[in-house]
Image (tube, grey):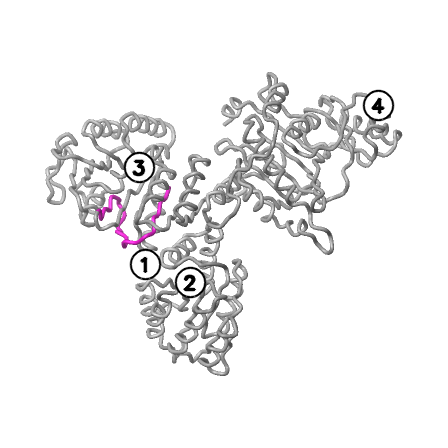
Amino acid sequence: MERDINAIMGPRSIAIVGASSRKGSVGNDVFRNVVNAEFQGVVYPVNPRAQYINSVPCYQSLADISGPVDLGIIIVPARSVPQVIEEAAQKGVKGLIIISAGFKEIGGEGAELENRVRNLVRKHGIPLIGPNCLGVINTHETVSMNASFSRWMPLPGNIAFISQSGALCTAVLDFAGGRKIGFSKFVSFGNKADINEIDLLEYLGNDPYTDVILMYLEDITDGRKFIEKASRITWEFEKPILALKSGRSEEGARAASSHTGSLAGSDAVYDAIFYQSGIQRLETIEELFDCANAFSTQSMPRGRKVAIITNAGGPGIMATDASIRHGLQLASLTAKTTELLQRSLPPTANIQNPVDIIGDAKHDRYEAAIRAVLMDKNVDCAVIILTPQSMTDIMETAEIIPRVTSGVAKPVTCSFMGVVDVSKGVEYLETHGIPNYPFPEAAVRSLASMCRFTEILNIPHREFEGLPVDREKAERLIQRFSGDHDYRYLMEFEANQLLEMYGFPILPSRLIHNPSQLKEVLRELKPPVAMKISSPDIVHKFDVGGIKLNIRTEYQARKAYETIVGNIRERHPDARIHGIFVQKMANKGIEVILGSKRDRKFGALCMFGLGGTLVEIFKDVSFRLAPMWRASAEVMVRSVKSHELLKGYRGQPAADIRAIEDCILRLSQLVSNHQEIDELDINPLIVYPEGKGCVVADSRILLKRPSASQASG
């Protein structure tokens, strides 16, 4: 359900509880910021120990205020916050911002106090941002609110920024001020005891004054709800969302028994969530605002074909390399365009892309080249590079660019290289809505981000595709296998039964309990066969000598039986041996891995990648949260480096990629439907040439009662 936070984001009256006349205090900074920003409503300072705050009459309590209060800003010691919330509820305050620190960030009593605060505001139905936050800024002229202790009131703009870190916000505001980047809304939401990033996304998606949303996140409250809200913003409202997420280190991964579990670190979860939401994840604050500047000022590109116009060869090559690196394509200029360029440029100029108009170029040469290139039907976007040479008329060149690009529905970024010499020209460009970057790589990277967004908007197959499965029978089987156990590792013959109910292609097999059964089994399965230990105590059979392959005769089978049992008794003497699993050997094909690991917070995470025993070394894998679209399955397959093997390599036939995608979707359904599946590996899934399908060659599944999962978390 959508939370109504209009009283926080656009109040008509504000009470500042804890306002102070002491310079340098948070209470004084917040009060002065609200007043100095020329807030378009009424401001009430509240402090029982003061009569005036900066010449404004002060109220002893919220109850003493005669008029209505939309927003209460609380800046009192943490232990006094619950009492203020009760007073706010009695006054009828419609929204709260708690700037005070001393809550869950300090642990112990602070965390208990924050829980009390959360319970109070939800009991009274008052939306709350914070605690432990910088505050909220709304630059729109009808509000003009700086309800924060930042020293900066940003310029108005169409970019919204939300952040879990208040300290980062102050640096971002300073950075954006230096770059003349404006904001529609700026929100530091701190500990998110009540209002979280999902509520803010909902608000900003509907905000007519916000066209681009930027986020800094340390965690996500609810992955599935986040995807739902962000997806709507991306595909329904067509607003780009750009994110920074801290914590890419491998130390975030939890130890696990499966290949998938060991590879599925927390960062993989966030990458999956962002992809499935249409969000672009960036690495640095500079990248975040480089891209946001382009999104906020330029029209969206139709495709990835970029043209480069430069007055210097080296920077043109740099831009070309950056274009290829970021997935753009150099546009092939039409004969008509090259003819126009030939007439307008000197003989020494390069009239192919990148277009080099030579170092002595002045604004007239730039104008002719830009006009010709942007009119080319093969060009989707353009980068204009200027190096300040002695004859370069920098300001005149800057002045022609907005004029020439006006009315052309193609994004343009500039790189007037340097700082001092080009400063006035850069200021003119930015004032007239043309993003400029000190170096060409950033100009290219920003265009590439816009091109990716265009492709995101056009992703096909964005629907959940249900394949025919036997869910009810699988549910009964899981209950039987689980029994009274909180944790239960399924042996391969058990796991295969479950997979078969979800339509996975399973090899013929039999479980035997003594060597006398081998003759009959070999006759039934038709060698060659594989023989594997069947034990609930052994996860990685290969590592303990529990597998023998390519068995063709009864003699070989008996020797294999003895060897496998001997290996287990020697290397794993406590293991319970339930028998030997005899399986028809699969024909050779390409080995891939499918897997799933249930994240305690976000649910089941599905994995695809290069299979076999080396999967944890190469880590050529991709992840998505279940349930997923067919588009997600398609991209999972395309995004691994070994995709080239699947497409057909050095005369080898292309693999049956559609069969892989179907198996990924079956896996998604399986782990979505059955919460008891905690970890699952299909390794390898052997894939055959296009149209020939695939088979499951090995599988392992860990069942866990949901209550046990919660207890372990």
| Chain-order first, disc 1 or disc 3 | 3
Pointer 3 residue: 129
| Chain-order first, disc 3 or disc 4 | 3
Pointer 2 residue: 410
Left or right of residue 599, residue 411 in this image: left
Q: Quadrant of residue 506?
A: top right
Residue 488: mark in rendering: none
Cβ atoms at labels 1 and 3 below 8 Å apart: no
| Chain-order first, disc 2 or disc 3 | 3
Nearer the viewer's eye, disc 1 or disc 2? 2
Q: Quadrant of the N terminus?
A: top left
Q: Is residue 616 above or below residue 456?
A: above
Instruction: Tell me the distance, in whole angstroms, between the alpha carbons under discs 3 and 4.
Output: 69 Å
Q: Quadrant of residue 79?
A: top left
Q: Amino acid at mark 3?
A: Ile
Confirm whether residue 88 shows in the render. yes
Q: Amino acid at mark 1?
A: Gly
| SS at badge 3 | strand
Cβ atoms at labels 1 and 4 below 8 Å apart: no
Most foreground residue, 355 or 487: 355
